[in-house]
C-alpha cells in the first residue's frame, strides 16, 4: 500500500486522483454524496460500511486488487486496535420466560428492518437503533431485555453487553464512570484510556461503538441525563434501554411500554414455576392467584417461587392467603424477592408533592380517576395536580389512558400502606371527604342536563370539569361512575339523606341513557331508604317510582316491581301529588303488560294518562301514550297500534319545547321502533326497515348504547324475516360489537342469530 499512513481517507484520495476524478465526478459515478466523500478523505468521519465502500469502488472502476485494498483499509479504519469479537457480559438468562410475544416480535422486526441494518449509500452516517423499554416496578423489563438479547445475539457478532445503570440507587453511577466500563469491556486498554484523558472519553466511546455490531443493554436507567451520553451516535450498535421512568426527554428512540401480562400468560408463567401437575389440580385457584398478583410478573414469580419451595402448599391455600388485602404485599415475599421492596425503590425518589398524591390516590374507590378528582385529594389546583400526576406517570408508578389515571392493583395496596404509615387518619379522612363531596356535587350538576327544568350548569358553578353539553355530562358520569357511587354509599352511611335524594333525583332521566350500567337498582334503593329517613311522603313516592323502574327494566323483574309501584302510589296519595300517582300507575301498567295481564295493564294505563293530562305533565303523557301503543301491539291489534304510535308523535310535535330535547329524542326513537315492529307484523317490510334504521341512527347519534342494542336486534330480526340475511348479519354484528353498556339479552340473541347464519 503506497498510502503513507494507511488510512481509508488517504487511500481513497490516492485512488481517486489516480483515476483523474474530482470529488464531484466520483460522487456522480458512485452515488455517494460530495460531502460524504470529502468527510472521508479529510478523516472527519470513520470509515464507511461495506455497502458504501462497494459503491465507491464501483465508481472508481477498481480491479479486484485495489478493491480489496480499499475494503481492508475500511475494516482497519472501523476498528483501530480494538477487536472485542464475541464479548458477552449478560447474567444468567431466565429460562422460564413466558409471554411478551408481541414485544419480542417488535424488537425482532426492528433488528431486521432494512432501514436499520444498512448504511446510507450516499455516505451519510447510519442512525443507530435505540429502544426504550419502560414500565412499572416488577413489570419484567430486564427479563424482556435479556430474552430479546438472547434471541437477537447472532445479529451482533461484535459483542453483547449489559450495563447495570443502578438507577434506583441513592447515588447511581454517572455517565463518565459507566462509559469507561463499556470501553474496557470492548477491549480498550487502560493505557489508551489514560492517554486520551477523561475529556476525550466520549469521543472515543462513540468511535469504538460506531462501526461495530454490538448489542448494548443499558438496564435500570435513572433518567435521561444518565443514559443520553451512553447512546451510540452513529453506526451499528443497537441500544436497548430499560427504565422505570418513561424517559420522555430522549430523542429518536423507539418506545416500548410494558403493561401487565394477560390472564393466559400469567397462568402459563405460574404453571412453568409450580409444575403442570399442581396447576392442573386446581385451575380455578391458579387463575385466582394470577389475578391477586395483578398479573405483575414480579408478583407472579414470587408466588411461583413460594409454591415451588413449599410443596406441601396447595394453590388454594396461597390464593386464600393472598385474598386478604391487608396482608397481600407481605405475602408476596420469597427470600430476597419482595414486591413491596421493588415499589420502595421508586417511591423514595418521588418529590414530596408526588409522594403525597401517590399515597392519597389509594383513597379513590374506583379503578381510575381524573386530574380534577385527584386535585381534591391534595387541595392542589387543576394544573398543579396534572403536573404531579404526570410525574407519577413518568416514574412508572401510575398508568394513564386518555385523561384517566390508574394505579396498578398492587401499587394501590402499597400506596395505602404508605398512607397509613405516613399520614394521620384525620388527614386521610379529610382528603376522602373532600373528594366525595366534589364527586356528588358534580354528579348533581351533570345529571341535571337531563332533568326537565334544569339543563346547563348555572354560570355561578365553579366547576373544574367540562360539562358544557349533555354529551360531556354523560361522559363524566360514566367515567366517574364507580367513584360517585362510592361517594353516594358513604353519604348514606353518614346519614346525609338529603344529599342522597338530591343525587338520585338529578340522575333519574339520565339513567335512561345508561340503562344496563348495573347499579341503578342500588342507587334508587339507597335513595328510597334516605327518603323514608327524611319522613317526606312525596320524596318517598318519587324514589319508589324510580326504584320500581330499575327493578322492572334493569333487573328484568316485573312481578317484583309491582310492590314498589304500589308503595309509590300509596305514598303519592298521602302526599297529594297526582304526578307521582300517575307514574306509579304507569310503571304498574308496564309490569302487567310484561306479565301478559292485558286488562290490568290497560286499566292502569288509562288512569295514568288521565292524571298526566290533568296535571299538564307532557313527559308523562308521552310515556303513557307509548305504553298504550305497546298494549295494542301485543294484543295483535296492529292497525290500532299504528294509530296509537302516530298519536304519540302528534302529541310530541304539539308539546314542542315543553319536552326536554333528550326525552323528545328518546320518545321519537321508541315510537319509530314500535312502528317498525308493527309494520313488520303487517308485512310492510320497506316501511318497517326504514323506521327501524332511523331509530338505530337516533340512538347511535345520542350515544345511548342500551337502546341502540335493542333497536339493532329488532332491525336484524325484521331483516331476517324479510329475507335479507346479509343486512341482518350486519345489524347483529353491530349489536355484538357495542360493548358492556348494551342490553346483554340482545347481545346474546345477536350471537345466536350469527351462529345460525354461519351454519346456514
Image (cartoon, rainbow, N blue to C red):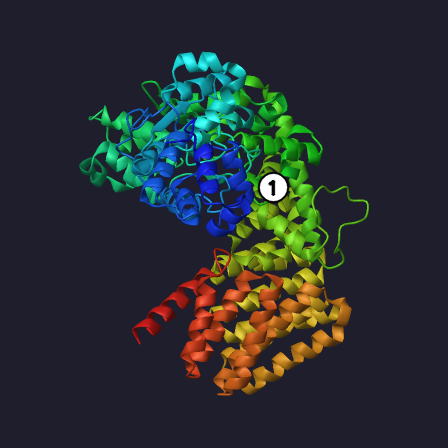
Q: What is the quadrant of residue 698 in the picture?
A: bottom right
Please name whichever residue, 314 or 592, is drawn nearer the observer in this view of the structure. Answer: 314
Q: Position of residue 171 (x, y in %)?
A: 51, 14
Q: Residue at x 45, y 45 (%)?
A: 19
As displayed, is residue 499 above or below residue 243?
below
Report the number of numbered marks: 1
Q: Say if residue 325 shows up in the picture.
A: no
Q: Tell me the quadrant of the picture where the C terminus can be found.
A: bottom left
Q: Residue at x 43, y 27 (%)?
A: 4
Please name whichever residue, 333 or 612, is drawn nearer the observer in this view of the structure. Answer: 333
As displayed, is residue 309 above or below residue 721?
above
Q: Tell me the quadrant of the picture where the N terminus can be found.
A: top left
Q: Position of residue 666 (x, y in %)?
A: 63, 67
Please name whichever residue, 204 or 33, is drawn nearer the observer in this view of the structure. Answer: 33
For disc 1, the marked residue is 488
Q: Secondary structure at mark 1?
A: helix
- Furthest residue toward right: 460
Q: What is the quadrant of residue 574 in the picture?
A: bottom right
Please name whichever residue, 497 or 683, is drawn nearer the observer in this view of the structure. Answer: 683
Q: Position of residue 705 (x, y in %)?
A: 54, 61
Q: Position of residue 277 (x, y in %)?
A: 18, 37
Q: Residues within 10 Å of mark 1 (few under 14, many from 20)?
A: many
Q: Residue at x 46, y 47 (%)?
A: 121
Q: Residue at x 57, y 79 (%)?
A: 691
Q: Say if residue 756 shows up in the picture.
A: yes
Amino acid at each position: 500500500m503506497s498510502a503513507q499512513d494507511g488510512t481509508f481517507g488517504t487511500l481513497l484520495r490516492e485512488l481517486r486522483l489516480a483515476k483523474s476524478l474530482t470529488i464531484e465526478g466520483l460522487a456522480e459515478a458512485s452515488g455517494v454524496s460530495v460531502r460524504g466523500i470529502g468527510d472521508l478523505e479529510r478523516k472527519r468521519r470513520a470509515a464507511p460500511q461495506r455497502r458504501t465502500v462497494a459503491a465507491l469502488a464501483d465508481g472508481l472502476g477498481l480491479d479486484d486488487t485495489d478493491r480489496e485494498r480499499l475494503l481492508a483499509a475500511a475494516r482497519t479504519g472501523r476498528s483501530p486496535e480494538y477487536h472485542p469479537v464475541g464479548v458477552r457480559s449478560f447474567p444468567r438468562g431466565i429460562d422460564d420466560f413466558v409471554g411478551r410475544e408481541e414485544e419480542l416480535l417488535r424488537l425482532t422486526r426492528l433488528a431486521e428492518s432494512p432501514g436499520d441494518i444498512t448504511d446510507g449509500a450516499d455516505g451519510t452516517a447510519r442512525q443507530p437503533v435505540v429502544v426504550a423499554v419502560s414500565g412499572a416496578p416488577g413489570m419484567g423489563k430486564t427479563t424482556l431485555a435479556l430474552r430479546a438479547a438472547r434471541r437477537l445475539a447472532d445479529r451482533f457478532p461484535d459483542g453483547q453487553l449489559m450495563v447495570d445503570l443502578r438507577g434506583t440507587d441513592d447515588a447511581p453511577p454517572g455517565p463518565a464512570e459507566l462509559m469507561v466500563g463499556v470501553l474496557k469491556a470492548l477491549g480498550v486498554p487502560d493505557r489508551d484510556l489514560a492517554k486520551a484523558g477523561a475529556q476525550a472519553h466520549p469521543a472515543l466511546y462513540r468511535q469504538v461503538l460506531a462501526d461495530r455490531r454490538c448489542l448494548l443493554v443499558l438496564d435500570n436507567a435513572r433518567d435521561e441525563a444518565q443514559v443520553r451520553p451512553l447512546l451510540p451516535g452513529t453506526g451499528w450498535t443497537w441500544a436497548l434501554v430499560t427504565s422505570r421512568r418513561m424517559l420522555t426527554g430522549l430523542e429518536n428512540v423507539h418506545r416500548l411500554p410494558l403493561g401487565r401480562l394477560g390472564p393466559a400468560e400469567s397462568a402459563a408463567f405460574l404453571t412453568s414455576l409450580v409444575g403442570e401437575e399442581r396447576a392442573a389440580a386446581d385451575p380455578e385457584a391458579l387463575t385466582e392467584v394470577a389475578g391477586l398478583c395483578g398479573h405483575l410478573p414480579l408478583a407472579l414469580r414470587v408466588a411461583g417461587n413460594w409454591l415451588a419451595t413449599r410443596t406441601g402448599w396447595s394453590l388454594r391455600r396461597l390464593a386464600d392467603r393472598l385474598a386478604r388485602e391487608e396482608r397481600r404485599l407481605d405475602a408476596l415475599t420469597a427470600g430476597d424477592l419482595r414486591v413491596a421492596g421493588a415499589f420502595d425503590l421508586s417511591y423514595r425518589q418521588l418529590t414530596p408533592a408526588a409522594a403525597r398524591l401517590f399515597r392519597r390516590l389509594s383513597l379513590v374507590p374506583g379503578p381510575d380517576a381524573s386530574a380534577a378528582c385527584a386535585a381534591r385529594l391534595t387541595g392542589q389546583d387543576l394544573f398543579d395536580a396534572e403536573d404531579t400526576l404526570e410525574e407519577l406517570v413518568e416514574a412508572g408508578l401510575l398508568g394513564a389512558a386518555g385523561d384517566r389515571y390508574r394505579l396498578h392493583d398492587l401499587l394501590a395496596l402499597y400506596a395505602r400502606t404508605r398512607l397509613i404509615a405516613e399520614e394521620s387518619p384525620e388527614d386521610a379522612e379529610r382528603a376522602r371527604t373532600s373528594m366525595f363531596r366534589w364527586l356528588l356535587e358534580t354528579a348533581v350538576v351533570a345529571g341535571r342536563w337531563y332533568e326537565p327544568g334544569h339543563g346547563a350548569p348555572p354560570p355561578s358553578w365553579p366547576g373544574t370539569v367540562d360539562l358544557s353539553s349533555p354529551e360531556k355530562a354523560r361522559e363524566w358520569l360514566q367515567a366517574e361512575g364507580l367513584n360517585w357511587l362510592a361517594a353516594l354509599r358513604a353519604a348514606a352511611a353518614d346519614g346525609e339523606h338529603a344529599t342522597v335524594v338530591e343525587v338520585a333525583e338529578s340522575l333519574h332521566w339520565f339513567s335512561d341513557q345508561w340503562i344496563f350500567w348495573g347499579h341503578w337498582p342500588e342507587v334508587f334503593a339507597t335513595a328510597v331508604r334516605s327518603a323514608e329517613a327524611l319522613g317526606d311522603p312525596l320524596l318517598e313516592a318519587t324514589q319508589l317510582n324510580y326504584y320500581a323502574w330499575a327493578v322492572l327494566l334493569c333487573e328484568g323483574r316485573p312481578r317484583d316491581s309491582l310492590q314498589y309501584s304500589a308503595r309509590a302510589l300509596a305514598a303519592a296519595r298521602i302526599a297529594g301529588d297526582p304526578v307521582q300517582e300517575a307514574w306509579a300507575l304507569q310503571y304498574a301498567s308496564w309490569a302487567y303488560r310484561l306479565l301478559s295481564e292485558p286488562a290490568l295493564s290497560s286499566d292502569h294505563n288509562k288512569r295514568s294518562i288521565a292524571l298526566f293530562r290533568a296535571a299538564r305533565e307532557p313527559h308523562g303523557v308521552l310515556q303513557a301514550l307509548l305504553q298504550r301503543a305497546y298494549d295494542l301491539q301485543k294484543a295483535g291489534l296492529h292497525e290500532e297500534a299504528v294509530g296509537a304510535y302516530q298519536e304519540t308523535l302528534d302529541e310530541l310535535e304539539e308539546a314542542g319545547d315543553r319536552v326536554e330535547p333528550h326525552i323528545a329524542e328518546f320518545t321519537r326513537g321508541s315510537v319509530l321502533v314500535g312502528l317498525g315492529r308493527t309494520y313488520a307484523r303487517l308485512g310492510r317490510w320497506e316501511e318497517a326497515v326504514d323506521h327501524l334504521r332511523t331509530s338505530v341512527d337516533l340512538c347511535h347519534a345520542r350515544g345511548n348504547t342500551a337502546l341502540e342494542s335493542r333497536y339493532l336486534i329488532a332491525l336484524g330480526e325484521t331483516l331476517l324475516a324479510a329475507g335479507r340475511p346479509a343486512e341482518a348479519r350486519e345489524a347483529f354484528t353491530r349489536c355484538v360489537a357495542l360493548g358492556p353498556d348494551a342490553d346483554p339479552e340482545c347481545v346474546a340473541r345477536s350471537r345466536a342469530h350469527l351462529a345460525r347464519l354461519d351454519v346456514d
